[in-house]
Image: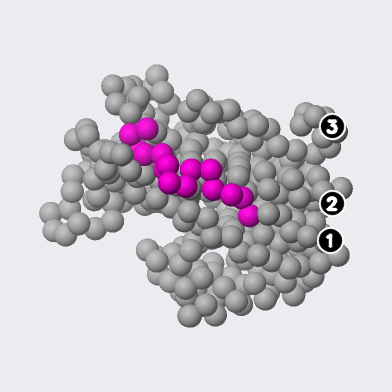
Amino acid sequence: MLSQSMQPKNSVVSFFAGCGGLDLGFLGGFRYKDERLRALPFDIVAAYDFDEKCVETYRANIGRHAEKKDLAHTCSTSMPAADLLIGGFPCQDFSSCGPQRGLSSQRGRLYETLVNYMSTHRPKVVVAENVPNLARMSGGAVIDTILEDLETVGYRFEVWNLFAPDYGVPQSRTRLFFVGVRDDIEGMPVKPNPTHAGCHRSIDWAIRDLEPISDESVPNQSQYFKASKAKKGNGQGDETSKAGQPSYTVRANAKSRVQFHYRLPRRLTVRECARLQTFPDNFVFPFSATTNVMQIGNAVPPLLAHHVAKSVAAFMRRIR
C-alpha cells in the first residue's frame, strides 16, 4: 500500500473559494493549536472568487493558483478539468440572518455555476457547502430544487448536516455539505463520524493563551473593534461568550458586531475569531479588521472541511 506521501493526487477545482477555508481543509498539512492535520492527496489546480481581497489572502497563504473571476459570467470550458469540484456557493440569500431571497435572486442561483462545470467537465466527485437554513426555506422546496438541478446532469447526491463542535471546532456552527458522485461510479463517500461528540472544545480552550497578548507577536491579535454594546436591545454580535462552552458563531459582519470576550472587556480579536474558525496561526489576514472578519466569518472552518475531505480521499482511493 502506498504511503500518504506517495499516493497519486486528485486534481481539484475550487469555486467561491473565499480566503481558502474549504481548500485548506482539503489540502491538510497544517497545524491547529497542538494538532497536526495530515496532508491529503489533493492538488488544487484552480481556485476562483469574485472578491479581489479574498483572492489576495488566499494567494498569500495557500497558493498562487487563486484567480479573481466572476463565475456567473465565465464559461466553464475555459476552466481546467479536475477529478473534484468543491465550493461553498454564496449563502447570504439562504441565511436566517440575511434577506432570505432564496432562488429569486441572481446570487441565490449561483450554485448553477457548479452545475455548468459538472456538465462540461464531469468531475468524479462534487462537494458544495452552505447554511442549514437553506433546507428549511419554502418547506424544503429550495433544497429540493437545488438537488434536482445538481443531479440532472448525471450525479447522485447526499446532504450531510454537520454540527462543527462534534468535529473539534470550538464554535457553535452547523453547515450543510452537498456530496455528489458521478452516476457511472459506484458508492458514496461516508459521512464522517463525530470526533468530539459529548466533549466539545470550548472558547477558552481555543484562545486562553492569547489573553496576555496585545501585539502582533501572534498575527492579527492586535486587531479588534472598539465598539461597545448597543444601547438598546441585544442583537447578534452583542453576545458575551461563555467560558467552558463553544463560542457563538463567528459571523461575517462588517459593522463591528463581533461577540465579546468571555473574560476581557473587549470584543474578540481577528486572531481569536480565526482560532475559533480553526485557521492556523500562520495563516495571516492582511487587511483591516472589517475585511478580515468578513473573510473569516464567510469561511468554512478548515478543521471541519478536513473531516469531509478525509472521507472523500478514502472514497477516491477505493474507486481508483
Rendered residue at 59%/60% (across/down) = 160
What separation in Å lies between label 3 and label 1 (alpha carbons)?
23 Å
Distance of label 2 from label 3 (alpha carbons):
15 Å
At 80% across and 63% down in the image, what residue appears?
182
> Would residue 112 appear left or right of 53 to someone viewing this image?
right
Type of the residue with mark 2: Ile
Q: Which residue is mark 2?
A: 319
Which residue in the protein does label 3 denote?
A: 2
Badge 1 density bin: few <14, some 14–19, many ≥20, Cα 10 Å: few
- The amino acid pointed to by label 3 is Leu
Residue ID for mark 1: 185
Of residues 267 and 5, which is closer to you in this image? 5
Q: Which residue is found at the position 36% from the left and 44% from the top?
A: 246
Q: Regarding mark 1 in the picture, which secondary structure is present there?
A: loop
Residue sitting at 80 percent across and 29 percent down? 3
Specify the segment rendered in magenta. Answer: 191-205
Q: How is the image coloured?
A: one colour
